[in-house]
Amino acid sequence: MDQIPYGMQCITDDDIKEVVTVLKSNWITTGPKVEEFEKSLCKYIGCNFATAVNSGTSALDIAVQTLNLEKGSEVITTPFTFAATANSIIYNNLTPVFADIEKETRNINPNELMEKITEKTKAIIYVDYAGQPCDINEIKKIANENGLFLIEDACHALGSKYYGKNVGNFADMTIFSFHPVKHITTGEGGAVITNNSEFDRELKILRNHGIDKDLHKRQAKMDYAYDIRRLGRNYRITDFQSALGISQLKKLDGFLNKRLKLVELYSKRLSEVDFLELPTAKSSVKHAWHIYTILLDKQIDRDEFF
């Protein structure tokens, strides 16, 4: 039986041309293309600030670090996603607390989330699983009533919308991933999106060893003095990766449309299988369809089936 492969990158000659141009230039890392990529993300999403880094995992890590939470504080998140989400909490000496998900959307259940709040709870990281935005209004209401920070893990959801507004404009910070299996790729890469200028400044310091001055701007002014303000990471993204990201972002809407057509095809064909429960999109969202997840009847052994 033929197997449908997992989604992968779509690299074309125009992408390659942009990367080669950067490789032939004087700046191949932490230069002008990084800033251009960040501005392109802001323009597409409609947000104020973007910090591009070398992976979605790195983006999660520095977003949590930016909150400056006390050691041992609790952060509520979902157990139903890749390990990087919970790991970002542990990296920062915090405690992940898992709230269960909704069966229909596979997203975190706001009612379950509410029950997990304690005096130690300081933040929520919710995940737009498979590309479908969570019940963001309800989650924001809970966060506001309890004085909690919000991080949206939208690594599955670039290009998705909630009530007509682009994801990336709801939480204190939003995370995107540009891994090859995602909607656009930079090889490896990620970004933190925010409308908070103080968070943006800290994010850019944290991705570069805690250094308080931008390398590209320092180089342009021949200014080599800097201070290391705090413990940071080396999460910098290269200019040739950013050039690829700029080129890919121009094609994102086309990629999303192609995914939607595949979803329609899958749903049409699989609707004839009576022991499958197929995924659906809520009317309040534009689903980005990173993955197409099905549920099997309980009497079906998943490992045997696949």
Image (cartoon, helix red, strand yellow):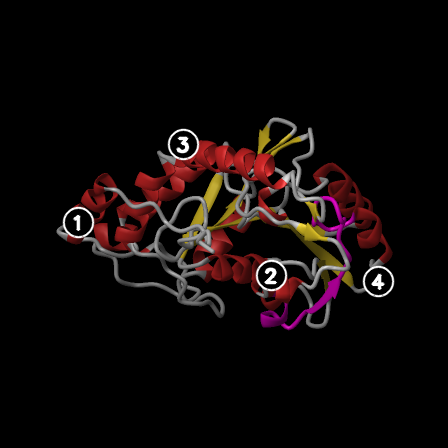
Question: For the magenta stretch, what is the residue range?
Answer: 89-109
* Amino acid at circle 4: Glu
- SS at circle 2: helix
Instruction: Determine contact: label 3, label 2, CB under 8 Å.
Output: no
Whole-angstrom CA distance, mark 1 to mark 4, is 53 Å
Quadrant in which the C terminus appears: bottom right
Taking the magenta stretch, the answer to whether it contains residue 2 is no
Specify few, some or many for label 2: CA neighbours under 10 Å numbering under 14, 14-19, or 20 or more: many
Q: Which of marks 1 and 3 precedes in the sequence?
A: 1
Tag in front: 3 or 1: 3
Disc 2: which residue = 85
Q: Residue at x 70, y 50 (%)?
A: 106
Whole-angstrom CA distance, mark 2 to mark 1, is 33 Å
Horizontal arrangement in the rendering, residue 82 relative to residue 55 (left or right): right
Picture coordinates of residue 171 (x, y %)? 63, 44
Disc 3: which residue = 254
Disc 4: which residue = 119
Where on the picture, by quarter, is residue 179? bottom left
Q: Magenta region, mostly helix, strand or loop?
A: loop
Tag in front: 3 or 2: 3
Picture coordinates of residue 3 (x, y %)? 46, 55
Picture coordinates of residue 51 (x, y %)? 44, 49
Whole-angstrom CA distance, mark 4 to mark 3, is 46 Å
* Amino acid at circle 3: Gly
Q: Nearer the viewer, residue 36 or 19?
A: 19
Q: Nearer the viewer, residue 142 or 295?
A: 295
* Amino acid at circle 2: Thr
